[in-house]
Image (cartoon, rainbow, N blue to C red):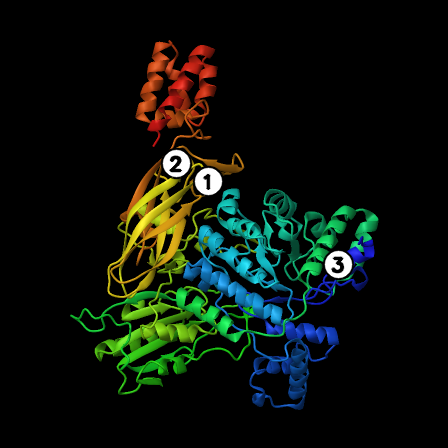
Amino acid sequence: MELTSDEQILMVNGQSFFGMGELPQKEVPRIQMLDGGTGLNFEQLFGDLMDKAGHAQKGTSVFRRVLENFYQPDLLDTRDELELYNWLRDQLRLLIPEMTAPGCYPPGMMLGATWDPETVYQVGQALGHEARAYGIHVLLGTPNINLHRDLRAGRLFEGYSEDPYLIAMLAPELVRGVQSQGVAANVKHFAANNQETNRQGINEIIPERALYELYLPGFEACVNADCATVMAAYNQINGVPCTENNWLLTELLRDEWGFDGLVMSDWGAVYHTAGAINAGCDVNMPGPVSSEPLQRALEDGTLEPEKLAVSAERAARLARKYALPAAAHIDREMTDRAAYKAAAEGIVMLRNHPFTVGSDAKCCPLPASAKIALTGTLNGELLVCGEGSAGVHTDRNTNLFEELRKHFADVRTGLYDEADTVIYVLSVPGQEGNDRKTLSICREEQMKMSKLASYAAQNSLRSVLIVNASGPVTEWTIGNWNAAFWVSLPGMQGAAAIADILCGKVNPSGRLPLTIPYSEDDMPTFLNFPGDGMNVTYGEGIFVGYRYYATRYHCNPDADYAAAYFGYGLSYTTFEVRSLRVESGNIANGLELAAEVENTGDTAGKTVVQVYVHDPLSALTKPVCELCAFRKVYVGPHQTVTVHMHVDRRAFESWDPDRHEWTLEDGEYVLNATVEDANAIDWHDTAGVLLHYDGESPYSWGENTSIKEIYENPVLKAALLRFITDHGLPWENILTTYQYTAMDSIGKVLNSMNCSDKAYAEFIDTLRQMRCLKK
């Protein structure tokens, strides 16, 4: 049914903090949204319930107390607290009579560490299932895929990786999983929302090539997975707010990528209401939003009526499809299983050394007879989630102390005389709204950890460090510990998963989705974060994370730049990869690869085969290596399996900022595969294959080849000299051009020398025939 202009305005303006408008007379129900990339956010749900009821306690200290103790009401003290608790409990029962608490799931950084699309899909299913149970129609932040540009970013834990290919292979599975349950996924924050400092309005000066190669691929992949909604970010990109960026929201997202869903703003990210609608931002959140600015804009002509109509229809279409009734039931077994699998697949073993000198026996797995002293930042308990939109209140979290007691003879909190094993949990929180000032841990904790590790070494105790952090930390003295595990923020089943790994029930198989530097000033973004006032320059360009470290290492292999690189992770067994080969296809149309992976140890386990592409000599500046394929695979002890992988044409392409297009350069490419404790730095020491692309490219030798390139290539220079001599042309012109304007093309120079058309064509043809020598 056609909507009136007033109805259209109602539909494009949020009507409550997490609710869209409804038009019962036009069969358009209300859409209820909620943050939920790591589980349902009760603070938001309770707040919206109170908004709709006009409840006076929203945002008060009473509300905070009830929220924090909702699953421990005995801790509530005052009459106001108990009254609010009872009211909220009754509201929840109307949605889900069984009152099952929402689950807390690992955030994007942990899902990135799984390197396993199926695991991510199962988490998406669980999230969608729980959202549907509570009557949530759009689950915000499913996924949050902003790239790990700088490790100090406050919401780093919500993003998946520093690598765009890994993001593009994993994040769409969360979309598919959520939407399989009849709930609309929401991909955020579009685009390049990489910091919290001055996030509302910060102007990010980003090179075009970095945008296309790093910051956009994950979003494009989620669009290809048919995501229902996209959230436009707070920031500006090169001077234009994302919510008012016609190139971003219409030309790229809709016209080029084919997105036909709904674009909503981040909460408070619309700075000019009419400009946002005109650019393609369909819904202004949060509500309630006054209708007056858009009514005035219609009257004065600054709001395009057809744009308003299209946005309103998108909002109505979303509501008609996804505003389904609450399912009112949560399958705890299924959802717990998904949370456990994500933690078990994503925990990374960083170190596993013998705990006594001269012994070959590794520290982990720990024997059942171990007597464990559990301690750490929070007395040995785990942080399971971050704060802000990703915060989850639940009574379903597993407890590390209790989980360890299921497997080991004696577990106590704090050091005790009979202990033969020390486990230290280093916890570092992260939150929306604030970037971390440093990657360093406080001096007090450094000293405490150092003393404990030294005590363990002096007394021949096993020592295990568990890094339970919202992002990488430096100065963690990892080398002082026999074993170390990266558990990130592992969700409600994290304690169960790490306990099962420590006892050997589960063989660790996670791989780092980011690089952990020795020092924050080693990061490529160190001097360009968080910017100067309201501007930040992405001066590192495409050299983010391992792309930067691997390229530096390639130039100086005697140096080391990080404590642990992207792709790194250990196992309780060992693996080898051999015989990487192309089974079919070609560079121009995509390749099908195969490789043999052998488990050379006595323990079954999973490994991640990682394939990196290297372009030995390129016209555009490129990183030394880039991830182009991977596959997580289970291999039994002393077994060999064949692994198949696909490499798309895009892996060999680069974005040319002068031509404003993807380009595929002719010449040689090298693919290398690695497994086990490998990482991006080690790509050149592993199974490899040499490929050649003979197609024409913008960089093929021809009339646009520069004098500099020809003069500095001995073979080309000799060919040019012969040509000039044979045709009686002045060589001095070539010398002068090289000295003063070396980037002039050979075509331009030959024309300036009055070279005949026949001779010109002869030399250009010679160049094209010689391009096989280019690499």
Residue 91: image location, x then y, percent: 68, 79
Q: Residues within 10 Å of mark 2 (few under 14, many from 20)?
A: some
Which element type, helix, strand or loop, lies under badge 3? helix
| Gap in angstroms between the C-alphas marked 1 and 2 | 10 Å
Q: Amino acid at mark 1?
A: Ser
Q: Nearer the viewer, mark 3 or mark 2?
A: 3
Which numbered disc, 1 or 3, marks the residue closer to the eye? 3
Q: Are marks 1 and 2 in contact (CB under 8 Å)?
A: yes
Compare marks 1 and 3 and give the one earlier in the sequence: 3
User: Which residue is denoted by mark 1 in the rendering?
Assistant: 654
The answer to which quarter of the image holds residue 198 is: bottom right
Q: Residues within 10 Å of mark 3 (few under 14, many from 20)?
A: many
Judge by depth and name the residue closer to the eye, 425 or 508: 508
Residues under labels 3 and 2: Cα distance? 51 Å
Element type at mark 1: strand
Q: Would you name the residue on which mark 2 appears? A: 618
Look at label 2 and name its amino acid. Ser
Residue 476 visible in this rendered orientation of the protein: no
Q: Say which element carries label 2.
A: loop
Q: Which residue is mark 3?
A: 11
Q: Number of marks in the image?
A: 3
Q: Is residue 743 visible?
A: yes
Query: What is the x, y in percent for residue 334?
Result: 50, 71
- Mark 1 / mark 2, whichever is N-terminal: 2
Q: Is residue 622 left or right of residue 288?
A: left
Q: Position of residue 589 (x, y in %)?
A: 45, 38
> Is the C terminus in the top left, top right, bottom left or bottom right quadrant?
top left
Vertical placement of residue 313 versus 476, above or below:
above
